[in-house]
Image (tube, grey):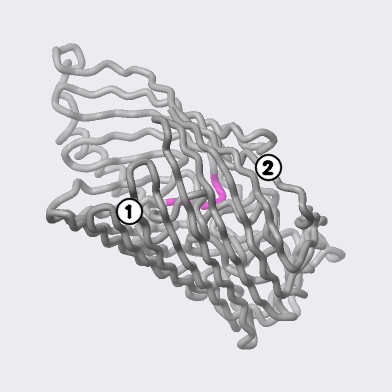
Amino acid sequence: MIKALLGTAAAVGLVFFTLGSGPAYGEVLTSGAIPPSLTINGFTAINSYFVNQQRRDGGKGGPQPHIGVDASNLFFTIMGASASGLEYQYRITFETIPGSGSTIDQNFIQLKGNMGTFQFGNLDGCEDTQVFDASKIIGGTGGFDGGYNNVYNMSAGIVRGNDNIGDTGKATKVVYYTPELMGFQFGITYTPNTAHKGDEKLDTPMNYTNRFPGNRGIYDYKGLQPFDLRSVALGATYKAEKGKWSMTLSGVGITAKSYLSQPYLVIGNQVSSGRVALQNTKAYQLGFIVGYGDFRFGAGYLDNGNSRLPKQNLSFGSSASSVVNLGSMYTGNAGYGCNVGAGYTMGAYQFGVSYQRTNRNTGNALKAHSDFYSATVDVTPLQGLKVYTEVDYIRSRSNDDAVNREAQFIAASSTKARTAIKNNAGALLIVGTKVSF
């Protein structure tokens, strides 16, 4: 009930926000108001990968480089302001990666005034925007949160990247950020359904083909993924500067009701279809960055608890002939990880190093873990042009139970070309360029 009331509270807050920050009657006709205008900007990044790894399954091996357009967006922003200072904005983001199948990545409205910032629509929540750790220091493609998954065969059951299980991605939501006061800023995100985007109907939990966010390394296969209802994320940051010193502290937490919806479910000995409740999402992430002059140091920690794990032995699939048995997965956890990094800026050059460790109990006290080392050099020779080099070394280890489970995921999903990997290690060289305007 408390979580359901958050939606109403957001609407009430918007009313007070408008009354306190918005224009008086007829103000839009007075001098000082800024009429809405369109701004277009964007970026594209093209990368070349060279990889040498122990497991070359799925064609990920050999001397030939891999070249990819890994990130490319166009932002169309319409913005105006009242004479009293209320800013209103509409933004749409076109994801311009060839063959991505996703044309519009974000679509939201923003109202910003002296009572804070409200956002409504499809965009990232505070569980993404209010995290400051080593991922904000490393350059290149992003190191442990970058593009390595395009070329490296990650071991089965590994939690990868730098997002909590339960991250809402670009699902439809309401976001509110307080004004910054004495260095502190707080955020709250309410997402009714993490499986919902755009004008999808209320019955989207029965849509088995969506790729839902917040499942990387747990249920990483299209159509075989859990989702959350009534997701609430809270974020907080503290920023301070004194002389050459600067500091940013951050923390976010997510809580939600978690479910899995499939045409064929086996819970214990009971066969059914529809929706089954999982262990609820309860996850958090902490981080900090300290700077002195041109130097920066940062670290972070995330803990997924038991988010989205089954409550008991569970099997599911699209039919009786295509079933994944999760086995002892319910006795494990959803993984945790930590990261550290350092950076130095010298004119047009930016240097960075980082390390991330992730651990997970995949069930029956069996472990899956990864170590990720990165070093980057970014050069900005011209305004809007960046050239970078990234070197990564990745080592991932898993167990037979996790490999067998992932093999079932692969067989039951449309990703037939993948292979379940137990142990792997490899080095990557990434050379890329980014143009932004």
Q: Position of residue 243 (x, y in %)?
A: 13, 54
Whole-angstrom CA distance, mark 1 to mark 2, is: 39 Å
Bounds of the magenta segment: 191-196
Q: Nearer the viewer, mark 1 or mark 2?
A: 2
Image point (28%, 52%), residue name: 294
416 up-or-down from 43: above or below: below
Dot 1: element: strand
Which residue corresponds to mark 2?
Answer: 67
Q: Position of residue 160 (x, y in %)?
A: 57, 64
Q: Position of residue 97 (x, y in %)?
A: 62, 35
Image point (58%, 40%), residue name: 200
Quarter-wise, where is residue 392 in the image? bottom right
Residue 192: in magenta span: yes
Question: What is the quadrant of the C terminus in the image?
Answer: top left
Which three-letter amino acid code belongs to the residue tagged 1? Ile
| Crowdedness near tag 1: few (<14), some (14–19) or many (≥20) residues, C-alpha within 10 Å | many
Image point (40%, 70%), residue name: 301
Q: Is residue 87 left or right of residue 422?
A: left
- Specify whether residue 186 is in view: yes
Q: Which is nearer the N-term, disc 1 or disc 2?
A: 2
Q: Is residue 2 left or right of residue 20?
A: right
Which of 133 and 95 lies nearest the eye of the viewer? 133
Residue 88: in magenta span: no
Q: Which mark is residue 188?
A: 1
301 up-or-down from 26: above or below: below
Image point (47%, 50%), residue name: 377
Please tell me how many numbered marks the rendered image carries.
2
